[in-house]
Amino acid sequence: MAKRNLPDPFEIDKIRFQDCFTAPSLRHFVVLMTGWVMTVGTHTISQVILTAEAHESEHFASIYRFLSRARWEPDRVAAVIFLLMVDTFFPGVSELVLVIDDTLNNHVGRKICGAGFQHDGAASRGGKKIGYGVCFVIIGLAFRLPGISDRVFCLPYAARLWWPKSSKVKPRGRSYKTKPELGLELIALTRSWVGPEITLRVIVDGGYSNSTVVKNRPVGVHITGKVRKDAVLYAPPEPHSVRARRGRPRKKGAKLSKPSVTFNHDQTAWDELFIELYGKETVVLAHQFNAIWYRVGGNEALSIVLVRDPDEEYPDTVLFDTDTGATDTEIITRFSNRWSIEITNRETKHLLGSADPQCRCENSVSKAPLMAYWSYCLVVLWFVGQFTKGKDFLFPRTPWYPKKHITFSDMVAAARRSHMAQRILVDPGQDQQSPKINFARSTRHRLCPERAKL
């Protein structure tokens, strides 16, 4: 029987991360990242250590100290992963699509740094949208993988911890920032990693469609977001050449009707568009015009798109884009890609346990979820690299559920099977000697055999 072309075991390229860590920290980083992907079930730090068998070669406390006390910058690691994704998926590209959102990791405990009661967008329908835990503002790179899946993947490479003002334990030496301010910080950070020839298109929801992000965005960044239906809009000012009035030129034109009124107006001209929304072909009605949303964009003209679903499956939505040259189809399709980060948040929690680590101190709370986010990126990078080489992933086939597209759960399962195949398909007679296990004993509790009463 011919030998199968099995994929190479999932591993971390140490050379790319040498400038981010010292030699001991680099070893701990590789162990944590590999163990994080291989762990099935609850992703606590202790369970990751057991899965990676790191406790057999060194004391387990050294890996805990890597998260709580080791001096390494998460932004440098995020830069390496981001540039690796750009070089792999977008060589020579002129624009990148980014998505910003926040997610709540539910925890229980009053001494957790940054924890508190706050909005929980992932709460069940009908219940209260409030939860207790720590919140992270996440930025991810959105794109498709032709030949692998028609779905839009969003790879989260950087995050910022946000805490409510009512939090019992707050980070030390860090000033309070709102979620839009943290999102703007992530945008500026990403802008510093790429050259001026690359345009960044950032997709945000209604919580980040405000003046903090739109007015203060760096050069070479366009924002696509959501407009309130009761927003006050103005027409762009008339050109100076046709102005017949004296004095300072007007910065905005006449006041326009609110979007909620324009939706129901008889004179509104609708264009029928055939586009793909959330994975299926849909017919929508669109009305596009340029306007000034002074409260958000100042005197900058924005491209406004009113979207209506004739089948009433989706509610009436108003979108905006800082690029006035974008078409209505481009704006609607681009904003629909924002849903990819919601899927990423669910998969990082359910498959990679981003909310599982029981950390309390500031450094551990800020860095532990990043291990899940970076694992997500590295698994996709590994899978695409092996897929392009024509490797056989041995996906299980079920007659009652024929899969047409590869999902992230398939990718992470393939990464775990790659290590299992390496252990199972070993020649007999090799690795017969099991490593010596040194059980670490605590210095606080000494053995007292003299107390035993036989």
Image (cartoon, rainbow, N blue to C red):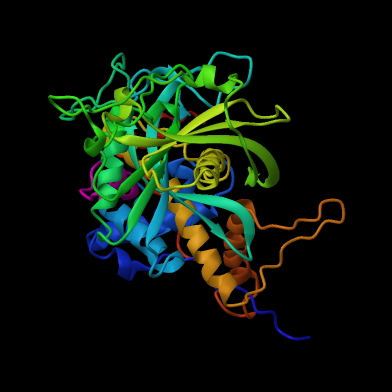
Side (left or right) of 128 relative to 274? left
On the question of residue 215 being in view, the answer is yes
| Quarter of the image where one finds residue 41 | top right
Give me the residue at 35% from left, 51% from top. 200
Q: Nearer the viewer, residue 215 or 436?
A: 215
Give me the residue at 45% from left, 22% from top. 228
| Quarter of the image where one finds residue 84 | bottom left
Where in the figure is residue 298, as x and y percent of width and height?
26, 28
Vertical arrangement, residue 130 with respect to residue 371, above or below: above
On the question of residue 204 being in view, the answer is no
Residue at far right of view = 399
Residue 74: within the magenta?
A: yes
Main SS of the magenta part reads: helix
Where in the figure is residue 31, as x and y percent of width and height?
40, 58
Image quarter of the N terminus:
bottom right
Where in the figure is residue 25, as x and y percent of width and height?
27, 56
State which region is magenta: 62-75
Residue at far left of view = 247
Where in the figure is residue 336, as x and y percent of width and height?
55, 41
Q: Nearer the viewer, residue 133 or 25?
A: 133
Side (left or right) of 211 relative to 121? left
Q: Nearer the viewer, residue 60 or 197?
A: 197
How many numbered discs sit on the rendered protein? Answer: 0
Vertical arrangement, residue 407 with respect to residue 233, above or below: below
Side (left or right) of 92 relative to 341? left
Side (left or right) of 259 relative to 86? right
Give me the residue at 30% from left, 63% from top. 17
Q: Nearer the viewer, residue 150 or 21?
A: 150
